[in-house]
Image (tube, rainbow, N blue to C red):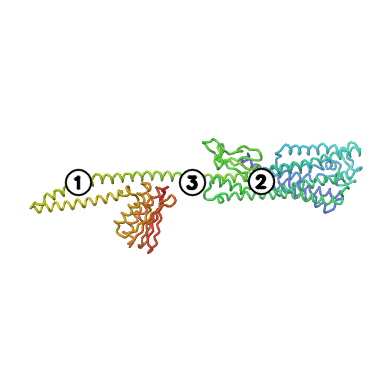
Amino acid sequence: MRSAGGHGRARESGGLWLPLTGVVALAAGVAGGWAYARAGASGPDVVRDVTVGWVFAGAGLVARWRRPANRTGQLMVAEGLTWFLGNLQGTSVPVLFALGAWGEALNLAVLAHLFLAFPDGRLTTPLARRVVVSSYVLVAVGGLLRVLTYDPSLDGGATYLTCGECGPNAFLVHRDPALFGVIDLVYRWVGAALTVVTVVALVRSWRASCRARRRALMPAWISVVVASSLVGWEVFYVLTPGLLAPGEATVALLSDLSEIAVPLAFLVGLLRMRLRRSAVGNVVIEVGADPTPGRLQDVLGRLLGDPSLRLGLWSDEARAYLDPDGRPLRHTRPGAGLSVTPVGSPGSPSAVLVHDATFDDDRELLAAVGASVRLCLENTWLRSEAAARVRESRAAGSRILEAADRERQRLERDLHDGAQTRLVFALMALRRLDAGLSDSSDARLRNAVAETDRTLRMALEDLRGIARGIHPAVLTREGLGPAVTALAEQAEVPVVVSVEPRRYAPLTESTAYFAVCEALTNAAKYARAGAVRVSARHDDGWLVIEVADDGVGGADPVRGTGLRGLADRLAALGGALRVTSPVGGGTRVRVELPCA
């Protein structure tokens, strides 16, 4: 995997290479066009020929500029330069004629190399490598044997220029038309066979490609197949001169046009890859507020057009990368047309992306994808950590509330079983004393006993009120409904109670009870309400309590310490408080408590 620094150096070195190559391609086109015209080609033929070469070279330069890590651009430049090599046979310089005759088919070998390496710029199968090596060997060896026996003055039709006055051949060693005919025939038939094998290799590569590569590079693949087919037909016309002469010009024109389409189609694929890079910037938006690994994997696969894309997250427990479903991730090593890109710190990536190998040469795209994945995963981890802390805080708050509730119940029992019982005994003893003094003539003593009796009864009522405020015994014995009903009977305003006969956890019941207490106190003290309605029901794992009055409204939980404290208490249990209190429209307090 090339580093960012290596990528930058490649671009810097390409800064001088690109203009120099452009100048060479321009000069080669001018020289090739001039030589082609000198050999007797018509003006349209010269324009068409030069256009094909320059389009290949120009598209290759653009590809080399935009994607320097991909060698396809260099191959296209090579195709554009070698396209004009055979035209040198139109010159009168013997050495140039010999070089042109020798390398006449070199552009076909480069074209086969380009087809088989497209779009990665690499030959990925043994068959492709054998075909390309054989093509270059055929041009190097077979082309040399052919030019060593080629005398243009004896056989001017042996070249596509059909120029009997061209030459002479500086490399001519043995002038034997019969021997040259045999060598030339074998040379062309081997070339035709390699063309067929090239098409077969292209078909096999197409069938082995994943859907992402087929969909993203469909225009280029179509142009490659069409161009390969037309080149094959053009070779057939050369092998059978005169057999189908009327269609030869048409096939040559279509062949040239299809070859022009190859580099243009590659640029279309290149632009689509750049569009993918810009689309990656929308990953965070596409994933949404809940960037789960499964959602992130689906969005990346859709934006990149790669349904084979898989996201793996490192698990310390499993000591392996797991997919979003928690299963071990397969294909964590490059191969079978797939590549693996680590995401996270070098040496210890927290995640990996398994994707189509087509994206390997676009390091900027993979860097953008990795940055988006890191951002989404960090967001997920932060949300998970925050949720865990909230759960811990709520659990701690729940434990504190449970402890406080248990303490209130203990205090209520202590008051009931201790001080309250002793007061009752004292009151009973005082009444026995009062009965014994019924015949006494000491009025002051009887009045003192009666006053003490009233004081003890008032103290007992106060103590019972305190006990109910701490934790009503009826709530523990009978539940929320009877406790709220008893509370309503003591309220200062009329209260209508509608509570389902159902028991809940002690802490839930006590929290709900005191929430009703707070709402009723506010209704009587601040709202100047004439009536209050209290309801409590179970709704899909939640205890929902509503207290509504017809008072003046205007209640604000932010300003009121009672409602604010109630909201904090409910939040500690995972509940919620909602207050609706328009001015002049009464107040509705809604309490929700989990009770699953």
Amino acid bearing label 2:
Arg
Q: On the image, numbered disc 1 is attached to which residue? A: 425
The secondary element bearing badge 3 is classed as: helix
Q: Nearer the viewer, residue 587 or 186?
A: 587
Q: Nearer the viewer, residue 575 or 461?
A: 461
Q: Residues within 10 Å of mark 3 (few under 14, many from 20)?
A: some
- Percent of width and height locating residue 280: 60, 49
Residue 33 visible somewhere in the drawing: yes
Above or below for 494 versus 132: below
The secondary element bearing badge 2 is classed as: helix
Among the two numbered marks 1 and 2 on one chain, the one whose residue lies closer to the N terminus: 2
- Does residue 497 appear left or right of residue 211 in this picture? left
Q: Nearer the viewer, residue 235 or 3?
A: 235
Among the two numbered marks 2 and 3 on one chain, the one whose residue lies closer to the N terminus: 2
- Percent of width and height locating residue 316: 52, 36
Amino acid bearing label 1:
Phe
**Mark 3 vs 1: CB contact within 8 A:** no
Q: Residues within 10 Å of mark 1 (few under 14, many from 20)?
A: few
Q: On the image, numbered disc 3 is attached to which residue? A: 383
Quadrant location of residue 73?
top right
- Percent of width and height locating residue 102: 83, 40
Amino acid bearing label 3:
Arg
Q: On the image, numbered disc 2 is attached to which residue? A: 211
The secondary element bearing badge 1 is classed as: helix
Single out the mark in the foreground, 2 or 3: 2
- Percent of width and height locating residue 574: 42, 48
Among the two numbered marks 3 and 1 on one chain, the one whose residue lies closer to the N terminus: 3
